[in-house]
Image (tube, rainbow, N blue to C red):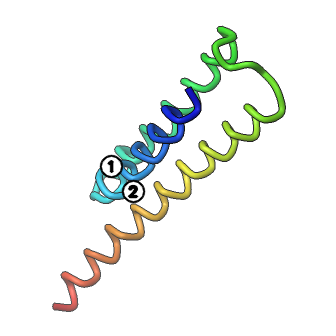
């Protein structure tokens, strides 16, 4: 289960950075962090994910990385726009 979580997390973060957040629609990149927060809360409320220190730390790290990758994707898009203007 842990390997699936890690592979799924890495895949969704890369998708977030290079596809969802790397465009002119800022709200599109916000979808993944919001869905991940809702998903993790629902897992903890339904006891599929135990509410202990390790799981809370993993959840906080994952959500934090989602927002960081969203910001990096926005930066990539803005850099692409600036390069297009100065070409």
Q: Label 1: few (<14), some or many (≥20) within 10 Å?
A: many
Q: Are marks 1 and 2 in contact (CB under 8 Å)?
A: yes
42 sits left or right of 60 in the view: left
Above-or-below relation of 16 to 33: below
x, y percentage for residue 29?
Answer: 39, 48
x, y percentage for residue 56?
Answer: 75, 33
Q: CA distance from mark 1 to mark 2?
A: 6 Å
- The residue shown at (54%, 24%) is 39
Helix, strand or loop at label 2? It is helix
- Along the line of sight, which residue is nearer the eye, 11 or 72? 11
The N terminus: image quadrant:
top right
- Give the labeled residue for mark 1: 20
The numbered mark at residue 74 is none
Give the residue at the far bottom of this rendering. 87
Q: Label 2: few (<14), some or many (≥20) within 10 Å?
A: many
Give the residue at the far left of this rendering. 87
- The residue shown at (58%, 32%) is 2
- Give the labeled residue for mark 2: 17
- The residue shown at (78%, 21%) is 51
Helix, strand or loop at label 1? It is helix
- Along the line of sight, which residue is nearer the eye, 7 or 30? 7
């Amino acid at each position: 289960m842990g390997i699936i979580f890690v592979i799924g997390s890495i895949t969704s973060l890369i998708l977030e950075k290079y596809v969802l957040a790397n465009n002119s629609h800022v709200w599109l990149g916000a979808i993944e962090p919001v869905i991940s927060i809702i998903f993790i809360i629902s897992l903890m409320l339904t006891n599929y994910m135990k509410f202990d220190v390790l799981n809370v730390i993993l959840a906080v790290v994952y959500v934090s990385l989602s927002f960081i990758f969203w910001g990096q994707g926005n930066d990539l898009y803005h850099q692409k726009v600036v390069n297009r203007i100065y070409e």
